[in-house]
Amino acid sequence: MAIIVDNRQGKVVVPAELLLLLEKIGEFILQSEGYPPTSEVSIVLTDNSYIQELNFTYRGLDSPTDVLSFCLRDDVPEQCDDHILGDVVISMERAREQAREYGHSLRRELAFLAVHGMLHLVGYDHETLEAEEVMKKKQDTVLKHFAL
């Protein structure tokens, strides 16, 4: 499994340990969901300005958000051996703000956002109460696995 973490921002310091944690979270979710070892996901760490542009372009919302997921699976024929699933984009500024707001560490908030985004990539959503409960249980399972 290839989890490519790309830190494209310089406003929040992201220690190497956190980058490694994001890779491990991605690998754990893909393995748990039965994805093949050739699967690939990119996790992009960015700032509020860039994620706001993405949010406006793809969702019509002109404000920064914490995490966005861009799934590529629908565009790839099933018989194709290319298992690039998509991208998870996380605003490090929002992650830092939310960590302070919720009273926990940046490590925990960043992990939560990565889990949330990854679960969207593999098909979970929170459009209905039932789907939200399923996704929340999955999130909790992953966070507990990593002692978060």
Image (cartoon, helix red, strand yellow):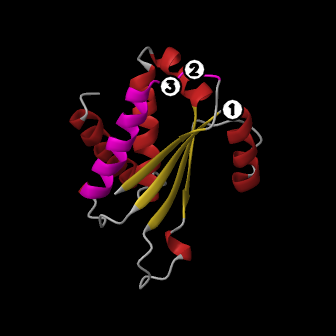
Residue 122 appears in the picture as rendered? no
Dot 3 corresponds to which residue? 14
Percent x, y of residue 74: 52, 73
- Location of residue 21 by image quarter: top left
Q: Work out whether mark 2 precedes mark 3 in sequence or the reverse, and give the earlier one.
A: 3
Give whichever of discs 3 and 1 has the lower sequence position: 3
Residue at 40% over, 48% down = 132
The image shows residue 5, relative to residue 40, as above or below, that is above
Q: Quadrant of the N terminus?
A: bottom left
Q: CA distance from mark 2 to mark 1?
A: 11 Å
Q: Residues within 10 Å of mark 3 (few under 14, many from 20)?
A: some
Is 25 colored magenta in this rendering? yes
Mark 2 vs mark 3, CA separation in Å? 14 Å
Q: Alpha carbon of mark 3 to alpha carbon of mark 1: how far? A: 15 Å
Q: Position of residue 113 (x, y in %)?
A: 46, 37
Q: Hey, what amino acid is under mark 3? A: Val
Residue 101 visible in image: yes
- Camera-nearest residue between 51 and 39: 39
Range drawn in magenta: 11-31
Residue identifier under label 1: 48
Residue 77 image position (x, y, % from top left): 49, 82
Within the magenta stretch, is there residue 59? no
Q: Comparing marks 3 and 1, which lies closer to the viewer?
A: 3
Q: Are marks 3 and 1 in contact (CB under 8 Å)?
A: no
Q: Quick check: 30 left or right of 121?
A: left
Horizontal and vertical percent position of residue 142: 28, 41
Q: Which residue is mark 2?
A: 97
Image vertical order of residue 144 relative to residue 102, above or below: below
Outermost residue toward the front in this view: 16
